[in-house]
Image: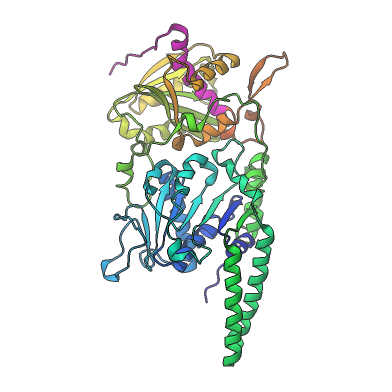
Amino acid sequence: MKKIHYNIPQLEYSIVRPQLGVCIWGRGTGKTEGPGAEFVARNAIDMPGSLGGIVSITYDKLLNMIIPALKVGWERMGYKENVHYWIRKAPPEDLNIPKAYRQPDTNQHLIKWFNGSAQLLISIDRVNISNGASLAYIYADEVKFFPREKFKEVLLTLRGQAHLYGDLSCCESMLLTTDQPRPEMPGEWIFEFEKESDDETALIILAIQYEIHQLVCELDKTRGKRRTKELQRQIDRYLDDVNELRKKLTVVSRASTIDNIHALGIQVIENYKKMLTPYEYGLSVLNKKQKRSENAFYYLLSEEKHGYYAPNIDFIDQQTGSSKQDCRWDGDLLLNHPLEISCDYNSAINWVIVGQEKQESFDIINSMYVLKPKKIRHLVTQFDKYYSYKKDVNNVVYFHYDHTAIGENASTDLSFYQEWIDLLKAKGWNVVPNYIGKASSHSSRYKIWEWVLGGDEGLPRFRMNMANNLELFTSMNGTLTRKNKRGNFEKDKTSEIKKSVPPEYATHGGEAADALIWAKYYPLVKEGDSFQHIATM
């Protein structure tokens, strides 16, 4: 018999199996390969021929992160790929595996199981995949990134199979997993389930399951037919009771990384404590809930109003297995149009914000960063690799920078902007510099963002590709205002020096976005007309 290790939170969730489960677990606790893998596999087995759903924030994360982790969990349970399940392809015809309930005609977005069950592969950036579907259950991972309204579109598909499996508590069930959402993240709505969590019923189920375990142990040793039947009847009654208790049961499970110390080892926990800031350690490892920010600098920034998703569906659907994402995955990229970038330069982190001017909007289509000890040259390489395909079509980059980019970089004896320009040119980019002068005051930036995010007439609409800017959006959403010692209004940049805040969630990203927005919108506000650069091709 194969032994499988589960940590205590994994064991408890496996035993309770509520109809609506929420796992807010810290780093390294095994959310996906534990509860996620088991939830999907057991539902597929318990409801033969059912169609469920697996949901991610983006389709590339679904293919490259979530499915590989699920496969690890399924392998541990004894289920092997291309034997028990097939990913994005049809099983061999000679196996005569039946179709799932209302299974799509194509296997492109399916995981198909040996008993006819299947899961539809859905992402928030491609919710159209679930259009018209009727799902028996939903598993959603990394929910901290899910905007409520987008996820609601997926929830509407949780319907239509009760006539087949309605007596089972796993019918119309849902599991949501994530690590601790920061207050600025789109998925903080998940905390609302804590009010509905019925821990008392969960404890009753645990107690009944213990009794069932005791009866099963006795049944294994019993040889008498009468006693065997009596024990089996008692087990079946208990199982029926558990099934009824699970129906409409909501349980929010919380776990820290330390709950998985037996698997990870004490050294891993100690390494986390050394490598992570106190803030990150408390959030990601100890799973501590953080307070919501107030007095936001970008207070009008709204995912609903300014955010969008634009995957290049045709290209993505041609990919098999896992593949590294590049600009061909982006459906909003205009290959024939120049890119526009601005940067932030810091010893802890270097950012680049990528924009494109469209006919009716200006879009932040991407953002990238590298953390210490990586430097500007590493970020330039990352940018170049991502946009290599575009470079072959149009290699023009407008580089917007202010006086903060002119200060010398001690590591190279070059100014920051000159290092960027030289490195980009060396890689074959046609760089058009645009010096925007001295960095604007915080109050001026605050005002121009008000105009831009408020959608003032005469200004191009501002948009942000959420799939490529999750960290930037979180950083900007968490940026606060304050009064300085003179009593003047300013952006609160103390997060940049606090060890308690990870650099990617500090105000660095917003600083780079400020420069890009100032370059694009200030000329419109000041002169009533946009500036245009002329590049020598």
Residue 118 at x, y percent in the picture: 39, 60
Who is closer to the viewer here, 414 or 435? 435
Q: Furthest-front residue in view?
A: 163
Residue 83 at x, y percent in the picture: 36, 68
Q: In the image, is residue 478 above or below residue 408?
A: below
Residue 178 at x, y percent in the picture: 56, 49
The residue drawn where x is 58% and y is 84% is 220
Who is closer to the viewer here, 358 or 232? 232
Camera sees residue 444: yes
The residue drawn where x is 56% and y is 13% is 444
Kindly report the secondary structure that dominates the magenta region of the rendered protein.
helix
Magenta residues, start to end: 508-537
Who is closer to the viewer here, 189 or 56? 189
Q: In the image, is residue 287 above or below residue 525?
A: below
- In-image side of 427 versus 468 (left or right): left
| Quadrant of the image containing the C terminus | top left
Q: Quadrant of residue 240?
A: bottom right
The residue drawn where x is 34% and y is 39% is 312
Is residue 526 within the magenta segment?
yes
Residue 184 at x, y percent in the picture: 59, 35
- In-image side of 369 versus 358 (left or right): right
The residue drawn where x is 39% and y is 23% is 361
Q: Furthest-top residue in view?
A: 527
Camera sees residue 414: no
- How is the rendered protein coloured? rainbow
Count of marks, rendered view: 0
Is residue 527 within the magenta segment?
yes
